[in-house]
Image (cartoon, helix red, strand yellow):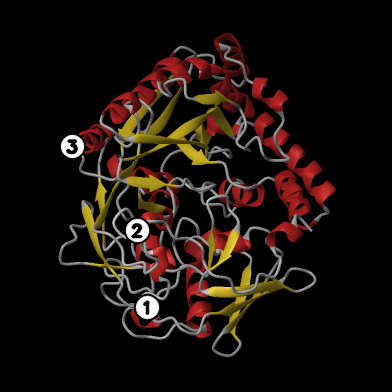
């Protein structure tokens, strides 16, 4: 099986060493210290656990919900609501042992039945990450503290998913409530103060006084403020209005540092174009691999990195990270900037006179990126018409409303990446595009030996690069800013540090 040993060892209950030392409270009481104010670039889509998002929205969910498992900043699995876990011999049944001392904030006890219901609801929900539980056949309570997950096929990333939104637990008493999207009922470290919250602008939380893991709560209050663009975020930073903030890009890093903030860099994402419409249902031209390859040749990725990425990143033409067995350094030179080759391919595909693409733009991104895409594609005969989607950018992509889009996506561990971007049910394959060769390779990766999986990974990567499912430009440096009062440990595989790893500076 695919790296099962490293992912599925039985873990005994352990103390969660996730605490930080507060400048004002050096005891282990977890009593917290004042207010943590975070700046985010995406408003909350919903608080309903069955449909909740993660990544850029992870701080919202982590404030109010516990997950079945946790991960440390390196991605190592840790206990949470589940204290032990183990698979059967063929990795199709996962058994979780749960804590027996946890209550939701409405007083309802957390138990195996609640966990089973939450898992099934997430699988059947509308979260962009519902595919995380695509392999879940049934979730069954075996007594009060044991839940058994039977899978339709092995899923090497399942434990990882249970540490994210797929593992978030909501009170069954809140299922179907009229206000479930705006008034979450979890067992997490904070409780949303709906009276002080302005939906879409500012979300205010107070510490859960009965939280079962008080040492992981470092602040008495949490405030999450939404900034519609990088300018308003920068102004808030200059005014000292936030303790931590995910920067939309690296354009203002120097000004952020001049304001007394620390830039915490991490290379998580690739950025470039996603070509969703590979079967040409929205635009017939995109069904031709030569057109998709032309999009790769048409963009001067090195110039784009300098102009938009401030030179902070590494050029690439593949979506798998350098840590993956799929990564092939030679593939990074597969599409060198070559406008003449782009024109040649377009002509061969029957578009010598050009073609038009409808694409989305958004204030959440650097305006220069959309201008440069439009200019460089125009140079090879492709006209880009933009629609400003504002803060609905992600929702419109996943609807899906556009065949091609600029995007910045994380480079996950292999199986998670595959199921996030490549499979028919992947969140970022909203057209459900399917290729028999990809399906066969993915099957080998999921069920083969480690050597077979590694070989299939390399072949899969080479194939999607050749078929130009994407037009990556570079792996971008992401930047998280913290003020002098705050320390954050960046999280492997996520756009934001996990909430319990943001602490008062000592």
Q: In the rendered view, does 322 fall on the left or right side of 30?
A: right
Mark before the other along the chain sequence, 3 or 1 = 1
Residue 490, percent from left and from top: 47, 45
The residue beneath circle 2 is 60
Mark before the other along the chain sequence, 2 or 3 = 2
Q: Which mark is residue 175?
A: 1
Q: In the rendered view, does 281 fall on the left or right side of 456?
A: left
In the depicted view, which residue is nearer to us: 248 or 503? 503
Q: Is residue 2 visible?
A: yes
Residue 341, percent from left and from top: 61, 12
Q: In the rendered view, does 98 fall on the left or right side of 391?
A: right
Mark before the other along the chain sequence, 2 or 1 = 2
Q: Tell me what residue is drawn at x 36 percent, y 27 percent.
A: 385
**How many C-alpha atoms fall within 10 Å of the one at disc 1: few (<14), some, or many (≥20)?**
some
Residue 220 quadrant? bottom left
Of badges 2 and 3, nearer the viewer stands 3
Q: Which mark is residue 239?
A: 3
Q: Secondary structure at mark 3?
A: loop
What's the CA distance linking mark 2 and mark 1? 18 Å
Quadrant where the image shows the N terminus: bottom right
Q: In the rendered view, does 109 fall on the left or right side of 150?
A: left
Whether 10 is drawn above or below 240: the answer is below
């Amino acid at each position: 099986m695919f790296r099962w040993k490293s992912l599925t060892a039985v873990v005994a209950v352990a103390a969660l060493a996730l605490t930080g030392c507060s400048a004002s409270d050096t005891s282990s009481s977890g009593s917290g210290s004042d207010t943590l104010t975070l700046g985010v670039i995406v408003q909350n889509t919903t608080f309903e656990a069955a449909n909740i998002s993660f990544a850029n929205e992870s701080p919202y969910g982590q404030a109010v919900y516990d997950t079945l498992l946790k991960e440390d900043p390196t991605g190592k699995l840790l206990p949470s609501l589940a204290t032990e876990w183990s698979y059967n011999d063929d990795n199709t049944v996962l058994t979780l042992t749960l804590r027996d001392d946890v209550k939701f904030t409405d007083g309802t006890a957390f138990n195996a039945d609640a966990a089973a219901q939450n898992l099934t609801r997430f699988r059947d929900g509308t979260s962009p990450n519902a595919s995380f539980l695509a392999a879940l056949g049934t979730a069954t309570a075996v007594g009060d503290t044991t839940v058994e997950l039977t899978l339709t096929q092995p899923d090497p990333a399942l434990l990882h998913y249970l540490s994210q939104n797929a593992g978030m637990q909501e009170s069954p008493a809140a299922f179907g409530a009229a206000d479930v999207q705006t008034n979450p009922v979890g067992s997490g470290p904070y409780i949303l103060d709906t009276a002080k919250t302005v939906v879409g602008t500012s979300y205010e939380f107070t510490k859960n006084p009965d939280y079962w893991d008080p040492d992981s709560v470092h602040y008495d209050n949490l405030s999450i403020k939404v900034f519609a663009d990088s300018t308003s975020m920068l102004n808030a930073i200059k005014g000292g209005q936030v303790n931590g903030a995910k920067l939309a890009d690296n354009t203002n890093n120097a000004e952020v540092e001049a304001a007394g903030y620390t830039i915490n860099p991490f290379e998580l994402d690739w950025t470039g174009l996603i070509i969703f419409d590979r079967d040409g249902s929205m635009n017939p031209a995109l069904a031709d691999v030569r057109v998709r390859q032309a999009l790769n040749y048409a963009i001067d990725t090195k110039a784009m990195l300098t102009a938009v990425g401030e030179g902070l990143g590494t050029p690439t033409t593949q979506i798998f990270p350098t840590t993956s067995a799929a990564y092939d350094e030679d593939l990074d030179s597969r599409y060198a900037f070559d406008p003449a080759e782009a024109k040649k391919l377009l002509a061969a595909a029957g578009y010598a006179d050009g073609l038009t693409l409808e694409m989305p733009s958004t204030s959440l991104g650097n305006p220069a990126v959309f201008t440069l895409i439009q200019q460089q594609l125009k140079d090879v005969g492709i006209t880009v018409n933009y629609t400003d989607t504002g803060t609905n950018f992600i929702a419109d992509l996943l609807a899906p409303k556009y065949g091609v889009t600029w995007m910045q996506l994380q480079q996950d561990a292999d199986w998670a990446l595959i199921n996030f971007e490549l499979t028919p049910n992947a969140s970022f394959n909203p057209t459900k595009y399917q290729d028999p060769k990809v399906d066969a390779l993915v099957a080998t990766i999921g069920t083969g030996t480690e050597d077979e999986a590694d070989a299939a990974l390399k072949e899969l990567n080479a194939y999607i690069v050749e078929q130009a499912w994407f037009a990556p430009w570079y792996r971008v440096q992401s930047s998280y800013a913290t003020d002098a009062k705050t320390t954050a440990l960046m999280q492997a595989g996520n756009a934001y540090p996990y909430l319990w790893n943001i602490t008062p500076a000592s």
